[in-house]
Amino acid sequence: MALKPVSAHLEDVLGMVAPLEALDVPLLEAHGCLLAGDITSERDLPVFDNSSMDGYAVRLDDVASASEAQPVTLPVVGDIAAGTPPAYRIQPGFTARIMTGAVVPPGADAVVPVEWTDGGVASVTITRAPVLGAHVRRRGEDVRSGDVVLTTGTTVGPTQLGVLAAIGRARVHIRPRPRVVVLSTGSELVEPGQSIGPGQISDSNSFMLTAAARDAGATAFRVGIVPDDPRRLMTAIEDQLIRADLVLTTGGVSVGAYDVVKEVLSRLGTVHFEKVAMQPGMPQGFGTVGPDDTPIITLPGNPVSAYVSFEVFVRPAIRTMIGVESVHRPTVRAECQQGFSSPAGRRQYMRGWLSVSEGRYVVRPVGGPGSHLLGALAGANALIVVGEDVQDVPLGSTVTVMVLDRRSL
Ligand code: AMP
Ligand code: MG
């Protein structure tokens, strides 16, 4: 049977997911999420004219001639602290002590920093003249009431939270993080930290994929290990549906006798199992389960296959559910520093190390093609994508590289 092209499978997977409904959440819960609407400020920032220094609120006319040689001395009529606006005007010939962030009183048109004075309390001697508006932060000079401060689709990071709080928003409309539950299937699996008996291995996939889902922007729950037992698998999936926008499983999707995921989910009729023209990651399944038609993606068990399949299909699906525009990893063209061969008729995702050398991208394969080579995977920062029709990637050729970790470049 002909293998299904990667592009067709990706299209099918993305076709079953859609951006999640927007949600109103308290500010800090919006961290890392996408805004579901434009944010318009209902106030000016700064909210009022205020002092940017500790000093004295003055009328320019009174101090225009002040210098070291000819200081000006003014009586101080009071103190203006942040949070307590003054109930008076500054009259000609007078000043008031003012603190950073305090309301600049009417009548004053500049602030003289305390450093330019003798710091007097009853009266103050000023040795330097400010210019008009000096050390006054003007109302609305940053944001004006009615301004759109953040637009739909913006990711809410620390600084965006800052401005939202500053304009007085307590809640914000965002695209929620998809909730992804991750199950590993396999009767050979035990928890890391537990000793392994004959034939047993530690479950690595569910940790890797839970973290990968979080990196993609999801709230991910690691369910852990489910043995190759049809009833227990079905129960485990059903138990999770309550908190899942997407279910991820690994293992049990090939043609082995105990490939339970395929056996159990095929019967539902809503999950499809296919062979995709890729290496690693040929056996793939996807569909929906449960009363709410929750999307499920069943990844192969070999750790490298599971991870690469996540990158190629699941990450774009999660990104689609988040509602971002660019769902795919960035790719670059790089010079391949070591030749390798690639299977005919399959798109190969070879693990690689991408770096910049003399201003150009260069990449070298890491480890071999084996889909069990988890140690090598952990030493890669990129996937070299080799076309279906290419069987030989010669040294020095230019290849397409999917960048997994920009920070390592
Ligand atoms: P399967 O697809 O279930 O036949 O698994 C393929 C290979 O991947 C087998 O060697 C499994 O032992 C291994 N494998 C499956 N699931 C995991 C897992 N969660 N962690 C590590 N290795 C796994
Ligand atoms: Mg298995």
Image: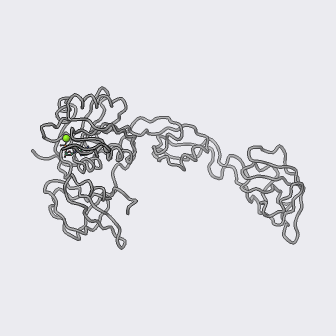
**Residue nearest the viewer, comparing 375 with 245:** 375
Asked if residue 316 can be seen in this view, the reply is no
Say whether residue 234 is left or right of residue 329. Answer: left
Asked if residue 177 can be seen in this view, the reply is yes
Say whether residue 39 is left or right of residue 78. Answer: left
**Residue nearest the viewer, comparing 338 with 78:** 338
* Residue sticking out furthest to the left: 1
Q: Quadrant of ligand 2?
A: top left
* Residue sticking out furthest to the bottom: 358
Who's the residue at 30% across and 56% down the image? 378
**Which of the 4 quarters of the picture holds residue 194?**
top left
Who's the residue at 57% across and 37% down the image? 170
**Which of the 4 quarters of the picture holds residue 198?**
top left
Quarter of the C terminus within the rendering: bottom left
Who's the residue at 20% across and 43% down the image? 284
As displayed, is residue 265 above or below residue 336?
A: above
Looking at the picture, how far across and down is residue 229, in whole percent? 20, 32
Who's the residue at 87% across and 62% down the image? 125
Looking at the picture, how far across and down is residue 34, in whole percent? 45, 44
Looking at the picture, how far across and down is residue 74, in whole percent? 89, 58
As displayed, is residue 404 above or below residue 241?
A: below
Say whether residue 327 is left or right of residue 69. Answer: left
| Colour option used | one colour
Looking at the picture, how far across and down is residue 83, in whole percent? 74, 44
Quarter of the N terminus within the rendering: top left
Circle count: 0
**Residue nearest the viewer, comparing 200 with 394:** 200
